[in-house]
Image (cartoon, coloured by chain):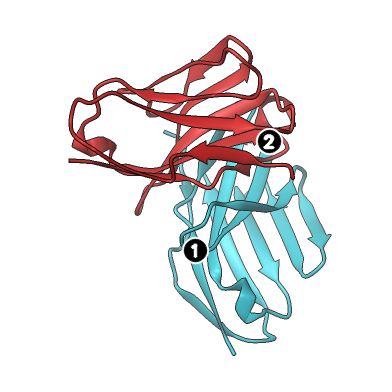
Chain colours: A cyan, B red
Amino acid sequence: QKEVEQNSGPLSVPEGAIASLNCTYSDRVSQSFFWYRQYSGKSPELIMSIYSNGDKEDGRFTAQLNKASQYVSLLIRDSQPSDSATYLCAVGNFNKFYFGSGTKLNVKP
Amino acid sequence: EAQVTQNPRYLITVTGKKLTVTCSQNMNHEYMSWYRQDPGLGLRQIYYSMNVEVTDKGDVPEGYKVSRKEKRNFPLILESPSPNQTSLYFCASSGGEGGVYGYTFGSGTRLTVV
């Protein structure tokens, strides 16, 4: 079983701060990396994908990938209360993707 | 609207009574997959399908069946449900081959087997 590890949280940050979410994975040959946001009682929603080492920015979100250290992170700048959700990390290759259990983020007004 | 539609949203059934959870997508995606989500265990893949008539097992396929007779539909069948199949189920599809561009998820089906 390929492992994807996330701190379950909750991670609490004040509104306007940077939230930093981390994920480590065990399978060195993984090629595709995703972050999903899941609001309580809802389905996961894809917010970021990253495939090569380095940073990828999309609006307030930045995904960071370090394949040598086998970790992927998500930074949320200017955090808003609407960002309060569980963030799922997904890692894998063609046809096979493994999800972490998620980190719950609370953004306090 | 591009979406993945699952039905039913909630289902309570008894042990051993066959059931089908339907999944349909309107995005012409070739790749579809079923996951179950349990507290502390994350999302685990049950089955996936690369295209019509092409399906394969994920990590937790025991007790489940699938079929892919049409591109848009990918039903999940529990022929003899047991209480350990009580879970939240998600169908997902992807425009990328093998799901490499990420998934669009359905709204989920919360199944309780008593």
Which numbered marker is on residue A103?
A: 1
Q: Position of residue A98 (x, y in %)?
A: 52, 39
**Residue A26 vertical placement versus B45 (above, below):** below
The residue sitting at the bottom extreme is A109
Residue closest to the eye, B114 or B49 = B114
Instruction: Indicate left or right for A78 with A106 as reference.
Output: right
Mark 2 or mark 1, which is nearer the start of the sequence?
A: 2
Disc 2 crowd rating (10 Å Cα; few below 14, some 14-19, many 20+) is some
Q: Position of residue B2 (x, y in %)?
A: 73, 42
- In which chain is the residue bearing label 2? A
Q: Position of residue B74 (x, y in %)?
A: 54, 24
Q: Look at 20% across and 37% down and name the residue there.
A: B83
Indicate the amino acid at tag 1.
Thr
Q: Is residue B85 visible?
A: yes
Q: Secondary structure at mark 2?
A: loop
Residue closest to the eye, B89 or A21 = B89
Residue under pointer 2: A31
Q: Look at 47% across and 36% down and name the residue there.
A: B35
